[in-house]
Image (spheres, rainbow, N blue to C red):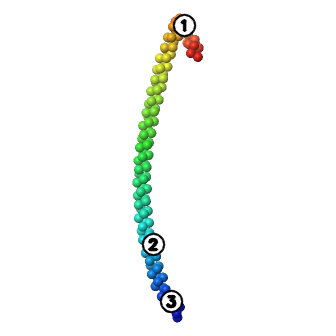
Amino acid sequence: MEDLIGLLVQVPIVGLFGYFVIKLQEKVDVAQRERDEQWREFLKSQSQVSNATHDQHMETVKYFAENIEKTNENIEKLCRSVSKQTAVTLYGIAKQVNGGDIKLEELIELLS
């Protein structure tokens, strides 16, 4: 009988403990959901910032690529122009040095 009385005293205590554990777990679950939602919002904003930065970088790269291409074209034109002018100048100098008559092969040999 004494065992039964001890058991009857412990049942409400165990029930009360279980109730508090359940309530505590509910509060922890709510706090975790709130934290998770805040974290999702933070990640979303970081993703948007990262995407915007990436887009800006891609525009910058595109701009530089276009300008590099234009610059290369201009350099090629300039090189062709300088080459022509240099060839004409060298030909004129070679003609003067050789008395006015020089062949292309002779000019190439002199330049080598």
Q: Secondary structure at mark 1?
A: loop
**How many angstroms separate mark 3 from mark 1 (CA)?**
130 Å
**Mark 2–mark 1 CB contact (< 8 Å):** no
Q: Residue at x 41, y 43 (%)?
A: 56
Any mark on residue 98, and which? Answer: 1
Mark 3 or 2, nearer chain start: 3
Q: Amino acid at mark 2?
A: Gln
Q: Residue at x 44, y 34 (%)?
A: 66
Q: Residues within 10 Å of mark 1 (few under 14, many from 20)?
A: few
Name which quarter of the figure residue 20 lies in: bottom left
Return the x and y of residue 61 as percentages of the image width and height.
45, 39
Toward the top, the furthest residue is 99
- In the image: residue 55, left or right of residue 1: left
Q: Which residue is mark 3?
A: 6
Give above or below for 49 relative to 3: above
Q: How many marks?
A: 3
Return the x and y of residue 87 as percentages of the image width and height.
50, 16
Q: Amino acid at mark 1?
A: Asn
Q: Secondary structure at mark 3?
A: helix
Q: Residues within 10 Å of mark 2 (few under 14, many from 20)?
A: few
Q: Which residue is mark 2?
A: 25
Q: Marks 3 and 1: which is nearer the front?
A: 3
